[in-house]
Image (cartoon, rainbow, N blue to C red):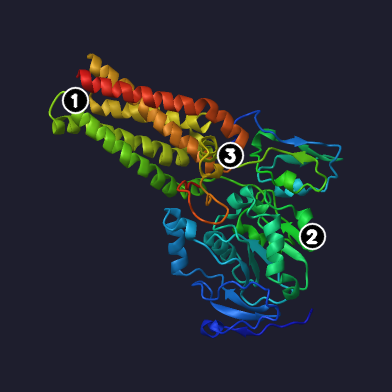
């Protein structure tokens, strides 16, 4: 086993012929995937070869996924891939079959060769998949078998991303498959330093941060989802304002309706954009509190700009309505950001939701009733 | 910048120090430096930093750690309450057949 050298066929066009697999039960990933640059003959058959260089389509795919376009279908065929020109002594890195996870891994290993074992996580990233167990012990053991990894490498070591640990029991993998699981750093970009240090990760490499940049990249998908609800709610507010106000439809809609649309839009931006960006600087631990705080500030600013006649009852009621609706919406959206954050516990989220969700619903409902009342008595 | 901490005194993490063999696996897998190695065994250093991901209990060969693990995601909790989408949120096809039925993409 130890002196096997694998001939490399660089031309991808030559890869399309039938596999030379000695073991017919070996599952080999699709060689025709766009990012496959060539193929490599191994004792288990002809495996797809990839490089560390991301192409324009890989980057464009990432951008689209961040905006929610084709996100659930952004997948890599599960199985074993050759990165560069690995041999039987090369390291084996395990990844998820979300294309962005796979791309981050191969990009981080620039200048190195190795094997990438892609688990079937249904196109979900490593951390989310390990949380629900699809990036898990069973799938890993199954994939080790189906890829014939044991006849391709002479060692018995796997490097897993640290964030895969919630789904994988290293000692069980060792017991059942004889492979030693080593948890690499949290971030793929730290892999070279980890490898060069002799498989040692520093405390920083072991810690999941939530930096400005890490929060910012999550905004598009939050915004896209929130905007879908916004468009419907804004349209309803616009129509109600036209019908309910004291003047003709368009006069009402231009006065009350346009402001309503603007206020709702600002609430969405507060909850889905400002909250993620300013997260550590906004007072409060509960995300709903953070969202409420932003919402109140936004409502006050908007009301100053609106120039409402606060000496009259309808003005007072309308102002009060927006002081309820905007914080309720921003608070709700901010609460939903717990799913994207890297440090909220399930017990904590449940505790927060116990009071925050009823409060948000009550404020929202009361606000809407007051806003309609203000329209009717104007 | 130091990582922010979520709500206090709510985490379900439990460590049985008598069972701990001080292998240090939990120190490796924890993404929030919750544990610290004592002279004899591991101790919980920063309980409130725990996000209940379950990596430590899953990887403890001695079974010394327990935690009610789950994804701290409001959308998932709501879906569970409403019996929608298998109680999953975002990152996932609702059913395990790999069919994408959910529209709740968040993270």
| Tag 1 near tag 2, CB within 8 Å | no
Q: Residue at x 28, y 35 (%)?
A: A236
Toward which corner of the image does residue A328 lie, by quadrant?
A: top left
Q: Residue at x 44, y 37 (%)?
A: A333
Residue A360 in view in this figure: yes
Residue A310 in view in this figure: no
Give the residue number, with chain letter if any, for mark 1: A245
Instruction: Name the image quarter holding the C terminus of chain A.
Output: top left
Callout 3: helix, strand or loop? loop
Residue sitting nearer the eye, A51 or A337: A337
| Tag 3 near tag 1, CB within 8 Å | no
| Tag 2 near tag 3, CB within 8 Å | no
Toward which corner of the image does residue A226 lie, by quadrant?
A: top left
Residue A122 locus on image (x, y percent): 56, 58
Instruction: Name the image quarter holding the N terminus of chain A.
Output: bottom right
Q: Nearer the viewer, mark 3 or mark 1?
A: 1
Please determine whether, in this image, residue B72 is positioned above or below residue A182. Answer: above
Q: Residue at x 68, y 70 (%)?
A: A147
Crowd band around label 2 with a 10 angstrom C-alpha radius: few (<14), some (14–19), many (20+) = few
Please determine whether, in this image, residue A318 is positioned above or below residue A75. Answer: above
Callout 2: helix, strand or loop? helix
Give the residue number, with chain letter if any, for mark 3: B72
Answer left or right for B9 relative to B91. Answer: right
Give the residue number, with chain letter if any, for mark 2: A176
Please determine whether, in this image, residue A6 is positioned above or below residue A122. Answer: below
Q: Which residue is most to the left?
A: A248
Callout 1: helix, strand or loop? loop
């Amino acid at each position: 086993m130890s002196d096997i050298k694998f001939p490399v066929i660089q031309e991808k066009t030559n890869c399309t012929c039938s596999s030379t697999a000695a073991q017919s039960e070996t599952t080999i990933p699709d060689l025709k995937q766009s990012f496959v640059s060539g193929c490599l003959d191994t004792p288990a058959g002809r495996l797809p070869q990839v490089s560390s260089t991301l192409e324009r389509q890989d980057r464009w795919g990432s951008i689209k996924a961040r905006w929610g376009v084709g996100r659930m279908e952004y997948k890599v065929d599960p199985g074993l891939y050759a990165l560069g020109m690995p041999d039987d002594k090369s390291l084996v890195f395990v990844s998820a079959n979300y294309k962005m996870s796979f791309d981050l891994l191969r990009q981080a290993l620039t200048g190195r060769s190795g094997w990438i074992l892609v688990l079937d996580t249904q196109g979900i990233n490593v951390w989310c998949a390990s949380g629900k167990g699809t990036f898990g012990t069973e799938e890993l053991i199954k994939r080790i078998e189906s890829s014939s990894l044991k006849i391709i490498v002479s060692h018995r070591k796997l490097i897993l991303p640290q964030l895969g640990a919630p789904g994988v029991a290293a000692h069980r993998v060792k017991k059942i498959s004889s492979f030693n699981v080593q948890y690499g750093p949290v971030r793929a970009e730290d892999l070279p330093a980890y490898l060069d240090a002799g498989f040692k990760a520093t405390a920083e490499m072991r810690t999941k941060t939530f930096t400005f940049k890490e929060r910012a990249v999550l905004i598009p998908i939050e915004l896209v989802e929130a905007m879908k609800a916004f468009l419907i709610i804004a349209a309803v507010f616009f129509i109600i304002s036209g019908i309910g106000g004291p003047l003709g439809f368009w006069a009402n809609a231009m006065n009350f309706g346009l402001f309503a649309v603007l206020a709702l839009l600002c609430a969405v931006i507060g909850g889905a954009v400002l909250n993620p960006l300013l997260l550590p600087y906004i007072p409060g631990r509960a995300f709903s509190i953070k969202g409420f705080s932003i919402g109140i500030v936004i409502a006050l600013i908007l009301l100053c700009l609106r120039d409402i006649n606060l000496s009259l009852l309808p003005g007072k009621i309308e102002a009060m309505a927006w002081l309820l609706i905007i914080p309720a919406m921003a608070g709700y959206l901010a609460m939903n950001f717990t799913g994207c954050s890297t440090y909220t516990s399930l017990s904590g989220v449940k505790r927060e939701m116990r009071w925050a969700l009823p409060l948000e619903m009550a404020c929202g409902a009361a606000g809407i009733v007051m806003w309609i009342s203000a329209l009717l008595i104007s | 910048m130091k990582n922010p901490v979520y709500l206090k005194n709510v985490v379900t993490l439990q460590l049985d120090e008598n069972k701990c063999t001080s292998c240090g696996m939990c120190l490796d897998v924890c993404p929030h430096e919750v544990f610290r190695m004592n002279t004899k065994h591991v101790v919980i250093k920063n309980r409130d930093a725990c996000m209940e991901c379950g990596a430590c209990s899953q990887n403890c060969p001695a079974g010394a750690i327990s935690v009610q693990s789950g994804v701290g995601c409001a959308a998932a909790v709501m879906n569970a309450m409403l019996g929608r989408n298998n109680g999953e949120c975002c990152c996932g096809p609702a059913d395990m057949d790999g069919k994408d039925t959910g529209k709740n993409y968040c993270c």
